[in-house]
Image (cartoon, helix red, strand yellow):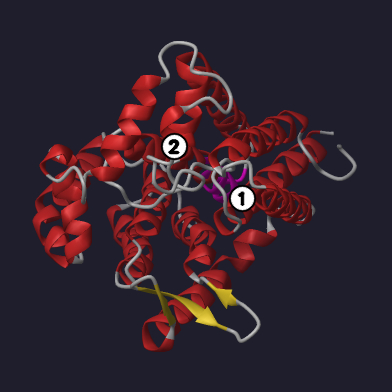
């Protein structure tokens, strides 16, 4: 593992998540072998990307950050001008042989660029650096929100804001930033599309529209509560097997898992997510380079934010924004992006070990 620059604790944790994904997907997908084959192939591709990114010298990301960020911005503008529209959203570029979602690039490009801007000066950075970092952060976030893609906008914003926090800004600046965020909420709400506004309003009273906007949340909460302490057992969940839960193999797969494995299973899954995040933060903390420390911290915390947003969404504590459960939900794009981030983390760890030796 050391020769190919992989980190055993992270690899084991990620493999456990991949195995859990296949187990619960068999139930959530109605025992459809095609879903298992597709997910297995996507996991293989994601791990291949992880190995590839772990071999790249970590200091290279500092040089490439402006180019990756700039290319991502150009692609986002191209999406708004002549992107492919599907399911009411204009998020893809049609290349003929495949459709490509440029916002996925910015899940790594934005934290890289924010870390690059802040690490160029002495930490903790000045208020001018904070302003520059926020411009870098909110410009692509605005373009992605226009697609519209609220879930990706939230995740990219969080990935940049956690770097601002880790950079060591004074608490008075953080409090000011939080106050500005609260004040701007009405304006941001008015910028959202009507269906996004309904999702937020439905959060406060899903039973006001039980067969419409509140259906997802209500059925998901019923499934989570039905799991009890030990769950109903694998393949035994009534909500999932009777297809009451919508999108049960993608965004709402946590509901299926909760119903079948109960509180004990949920605790073990969240513990695994926490241990993976802790390992990533440990790697980031021990690196001497400011840019790599900020980037590694953002990758680790953003992974945990994915879990927090998805679990909050399916349990009725957050609005439904279309964020998958990392490395568990069916799908390949976000999985590959997350594994690329972990590949960067492993490269940082290997570089640190080589420097120590």
Q: Quadrant of residue 217?
A: top left
Q: Residue furthest right?
A: 3
The range drawn in magenta is 289-297
Residue 234: x, y in percent? 58, 24
Question: Which residue is found at the position 67% from the left and 50% from the top?
Answer: 39
Whichever of labels 2 and 1 marks the residue nearer the N terminus, that label is 2
Q: Is residue 307 left or right of residue 42?
A: left
Question: Which residue is found at the position 30% from the left and 44% from the top?
Answer: 216
Q: Which mark is residue 242?
A: 2
Q: Quadrant of the N terminus?
A: top right
Query: Around disc 1, counting alpha carbons within 10 Å, would you say few (fewer than 14), some (14 to 19), or many (20 or more)?
Result: many
Residue 303: x, y in percent? 51, 41
Question: Which residue is found at the position 37% from the left and 20% from the top?
Answer: 226
Q: Quadrant of the C terminus?
A: top right
Q: Nearer the viewer, mark 2 or mark 1?
A: 2
**Magenta stretch: dominant secondary structure:** helix
Q: Is label 1 in a helix, a strand or a loop?
A: helix
Q: In front: 183, or 222?
A: 222
Q: Quadrant of residue 62?
A: bottom right
Q: Quadrant of residue 73?
A: bottom left
- The reply to whether the magenta stretch includes residue 282 is no
Q: Which mark is residue 156?
A: none
- The reply to whether the magenta stretch includes residue 292 is yes
When the figure is inspected, residue 119 is found, relative to residue 325, above or below; the finding is: below
Q: In front: 42, or 28?
A: 28
When the figure is inspected, residue 64 is found, relative to residue 247, above or below; the finding is: below
Cα separation, mark 2 vs mark 1, equals 37 Å
Q: Which mark is residue 341?
A: 1
When the figure is inspected, residue 251 is found, relative to residue 88, above or below; the finding is: above
Q: Is label 2 in a helix, a strand or a loop?
A: loop
Residue 30: x, y in percent? 57, 42
Residue 74: x, y in percent? 47, 81
């Amino acid at each position: 593992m050391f020769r190919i620059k992989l980190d055993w604790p992270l690899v084991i944790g990620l493999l456990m998540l991949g195995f859990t994904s296949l187990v619960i997907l068999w139930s959530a997908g109605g025992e459809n072998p095609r879903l298992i084959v597709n997910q297995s192939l996507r996991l293989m591709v994601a791990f291949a990307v992880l190995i590839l990114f772990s071999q790249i010298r970590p200091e290279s990301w500092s040089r490439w950050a402006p180019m990756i960020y700039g290319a991502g911005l150009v692609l986002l503008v191209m999406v708004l001008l002549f992107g492919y529209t599907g399911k009411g959203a204009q998020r893809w570029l049609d290349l003929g042989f495949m459709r490509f979602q440029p916002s996925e690039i910015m899940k790594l490009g934005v934290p890289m660029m924010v870390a690059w801007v802040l690490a160029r000066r002495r930490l903790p950075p000045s208020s001018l650096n904070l302003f520059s970092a926020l411009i870098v952060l909110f410009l692509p976030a605005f373009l992605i929100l226009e697609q519209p893609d609220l879930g990706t906008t939230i995740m990219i914003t969080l990935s940049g804001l956690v770097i601002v926090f880790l950079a060591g800004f004074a608490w008075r600046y953080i409090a000011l930033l939080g106050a500005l965020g609260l004040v701007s909420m009405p304006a941001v709400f008015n910028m959202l599309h009507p269906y996004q506004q309904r999702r937020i309003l439905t959060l406060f009273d899903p039973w006001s529209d039980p067969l419409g906007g509140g259906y997802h949340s209500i059925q998901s909460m019923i499934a989570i509560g039905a799991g009890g302490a030990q769950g109903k057992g694998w393949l035994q969940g009534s909500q999932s097997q009777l297809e009451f839960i919508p999108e049960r193999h993608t965004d709402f797969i946590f509901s299926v898992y909760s119903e079948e494995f109960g509180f004990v299973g949920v605790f073990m899954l969240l513990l695994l997510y926490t241990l993976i995040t802790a390992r990533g933060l440990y790697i980031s903390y021990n690196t001497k380079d400011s840019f790599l420390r900020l980037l590694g911290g953002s990758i680790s915390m953003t992974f945990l934010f994915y879990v927090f947003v998805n679990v909050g969404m399916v349990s009725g504590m957050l609005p439904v924004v279309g964020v998958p459960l990392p490395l568990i939900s069916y799908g390949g794009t976000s999985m590959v992006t997350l594994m690329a981030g972990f590949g960067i983390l492993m490269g940082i760890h290997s570089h640190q070990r080589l420097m120590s030796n």
